[in-house]
């Protein structure tokens, strides 16, 4: 019996008229040859908003979990994960939650924190595997948000490395590639991120007014001298973890097919891929992860975060002093958790493999209220307003995905994983790889409606400036300006319907 989206359809296959896309999907997953045009029909955006689409309730296909919708909704394993692999998932969860300690320590397998760092654990940034947020005020540590740092290329070798995609940015010479606001005892932290907001009023149709907040970023209490001239700052909140393995399992050709860098179709949307260096494969690959698609794989994303955020060396990022530079002498001379004389990193290959398995198999929860008339109305408005030009609804994952549970799944991420110019309002002015200072990767929308349930807040966008979904939409500019303006021009009840649809994701 063929299964798709976690449901059996053997009997419905033999009853009456069948949705063409459903029939093609069943043939595909049964191994029956399918013409390219039929395959395209499965992932083509719908034009029928009178009812839910087949399998729409399961955004992660058969990996979608049916557990209770509560604060743990983002922390369950793939529903189709074999029983014998579930132990690996929960072991990985243990490493994900591990609080690393200062070296040397009696707990030798968990020491090596920092010496400069942003969090003591992966869970510290990705609380309950969800979304980070900006600090509520000057006295709250920015644990799930930090500042990226870089400078323009000044030397020929730096320009050559950027052009060859060997590096994404040139590190600030003293402070590295991100500001570490915490340090082990005896060391000074690198500094403290300060956010200054100013109000920005926006008018909506019907006389409603929204007061956006425009952030400005600076660094106070610099611990190791001044920043280099021309230093670029970019704020980043920790993105949610769910569905990463499925995004990695999308065929590169399917993503590149959506790219239109020269806007050949004239719709003013010109998505383009980021190209970045793979530490695993020692070659240029498609960037998929991070706010600017600066990382190609889940393993590299996890490894670089371990080294940069926590200061823990690992096989792909063998830096026992984390992101500290030669100019930070006390950091370079501080003890580490590496085994003397062995070269064994602080997080061994077995640890990183378990974390990778955990990260790849965090499951999407089921959609809610997909047949509700208001949700269907909001879906129609979302599609017809042009939002899906970037937030592409559906993909089918590769047959040879890294994890069998994620192979040949019909998934609904609502993202094209491409870079788009989002206008001056959201610009950080900091290039990363191919991405320029105005471009951002389209963030997946799946799970967005449960942000408050899981994380207790409703802050969105790369720096959490938007305090709700309305504000997030109103910050869209550049290629998304026309869609944003259609939203602003809607009657109040239509805006409510569109937001209700988003909250169902």
Image (spheres, helix red, strand yellow):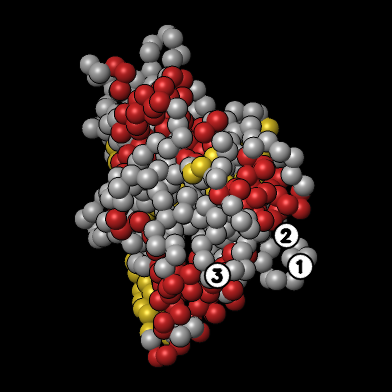
Res. 129 in view: no
Q: Residue furthest top?
A: 341
Which residue is nearer to you in this view: 380 or 243?
Answer: 380
Q: Which residue is drawn at 40% across and 48% down?
A: 365
State the mark number for residue 219: none
The C terminus lies in which quarter of the figure?
A: bottom left
Tell me the distance, in whole angstroms, between the alpha carbons under discs 1 and 3. Answer: 25 Å
Numbered tag placed on residue 260 in the rendering: 2
Residue wearing tag 3: 49
Secondary structure of residue under mark 1: loop
Are dots 2 and 3 in contact, CB under 8 Å?
A: no
Using the numbered discs, state the Cα–Cα distance from disc 2 to disc 3 in whole angstroms: 27 Å
Asked if marks 2 and 1 touch (Cβ < 8 Å), the reply is: yes
Task: Looking at the image, tell me whether mark 2 or mark 3 is earlier in sequence order.
Answer: 3
**Residue 32 to residue 110: above or below:** below
Q: How crowded is mark 1: few (under 14 residues within 10 Å), some or many (20 or more)?
A: few
Residue 322 x/y as whole percent: 42, 32
The numbered mark at residue 265 is 1
Mark 1 / mark 3, whichever is N-terminal:
3
Q: Mark 1 or 3, which is nearer the eye?
A: 3
Q: Position of residue 348 (x, y in %)?
A: 42, 19
- Quadrant of the frame with the N terminus: top right
> Residue 40 appears at what percent x and percent y?
71, 53
Name the secondary structure under disc 3: loop
- Picture coordinates of residue 335, whole percent (x, y): 32, 22
Q: Which one is nearer the viewer's eye here, 101 or 420?
A: 420
Relative height, residue 340 to residue 149 (above, below): above
Report helix, strand or loop for mark 2. Answer: loop
């Amino acid at each position: 019996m063929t299964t798709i989206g976690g449901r059996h359809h053997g009997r419905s296959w033999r009853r009456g008229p069948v949705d063409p896309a459903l029939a093609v999907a069943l043939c595909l997953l049964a191994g029956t040859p399918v013409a390219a045009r039929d395959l395209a029909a499965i992932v083509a955006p719908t034009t029928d908003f009178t009812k839910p689409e087949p399998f729409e309730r399961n955004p992660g296909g058969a990996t979608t979990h049916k557990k209770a919708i509560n604060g743990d909704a983002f922390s369950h394993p793939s529903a189709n994960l074999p029983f014998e692999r579930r132990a690996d998932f929960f072991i990985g969860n243990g490493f994900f939650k591990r609080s690393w300690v200062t070296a040397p320590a009696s707990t030798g397998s968990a020491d090596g924190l920092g010496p400069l760092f942003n969090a003591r654990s992966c869970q510290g940034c990705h609380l309950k595997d969800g979304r980070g947020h900006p600090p509520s005020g000057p006295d709250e540590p920015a644990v799930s948000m930090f500042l990226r740092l870089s400078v323009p290329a000044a030397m020929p070798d730096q320009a050559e490395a950027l052009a060859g995609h060997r590096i994404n940015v040139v590190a600030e010479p003293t402070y590295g590639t991100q500001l570490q606001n915490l340090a082990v005892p005896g060391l000074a932290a690198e500094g403290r991120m300060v956010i200054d907001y100013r109000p920005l009023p926006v008018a909506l149709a019907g006389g409603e007014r929204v007061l956006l907040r425009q952030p400005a970023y600076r660094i106070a209490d610099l611990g190791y001298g001044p920043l280099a001239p021309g230093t670029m700052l970019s704020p980043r909140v920790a993105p949610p973890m769910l569905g990463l393995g499925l995004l990695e399992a999308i065929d590169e050709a399917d993503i590149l097919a959506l790219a239109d860098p020269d806007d050949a179709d004239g719709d003013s949307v010109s998505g383009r891929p980021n190209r970045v260096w793979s530490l695993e494969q020692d070659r240029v690959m498609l960037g998929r992860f991070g706010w600017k698609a600066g990382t190609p794989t889940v393993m590299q994303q996890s490894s670089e975060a371990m080294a940069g955020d926590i200061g823990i060396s690992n096989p792909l990022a063998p830096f026992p002093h984390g992101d500290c530079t030669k100019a930070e002498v006390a950091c370079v001379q501080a003890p580490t958790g590496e085994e003397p004389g062995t070269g064994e990193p602080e997080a061994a290959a077995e640890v990183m493999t378990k974390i990778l398995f955990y990260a790849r198999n965090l499951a999407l929860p089921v959609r809610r209220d997909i047949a509700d008339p208001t949700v269907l109305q909001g879906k129609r408005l979302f599609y017809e307003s042009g939002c899906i030009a970037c937030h592409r609804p559906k993909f089918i994952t590769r047959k040879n995905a890294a994890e069998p549970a994620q192979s040949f799944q019909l998934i609904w991420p609502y993202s094209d994983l491409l870079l788009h110019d989002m206008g001056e309002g959201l610009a950080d002015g900091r290039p990363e790889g191919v991405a320029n200072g105005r471009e951002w990767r389209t963030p997946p929308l799946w799970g967005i409606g449960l942000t408050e349930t899981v994380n207790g807040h409703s802050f969105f966008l790369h720096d959490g400036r938007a305090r709700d979904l309305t504000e997030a939409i109103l910050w869209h500019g550049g290629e998304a300006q026309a869609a944003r303006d259609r939203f602003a021009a809607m009657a109040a009840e239509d805006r409510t319907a569109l937001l209700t649809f988003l909250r169902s994701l």
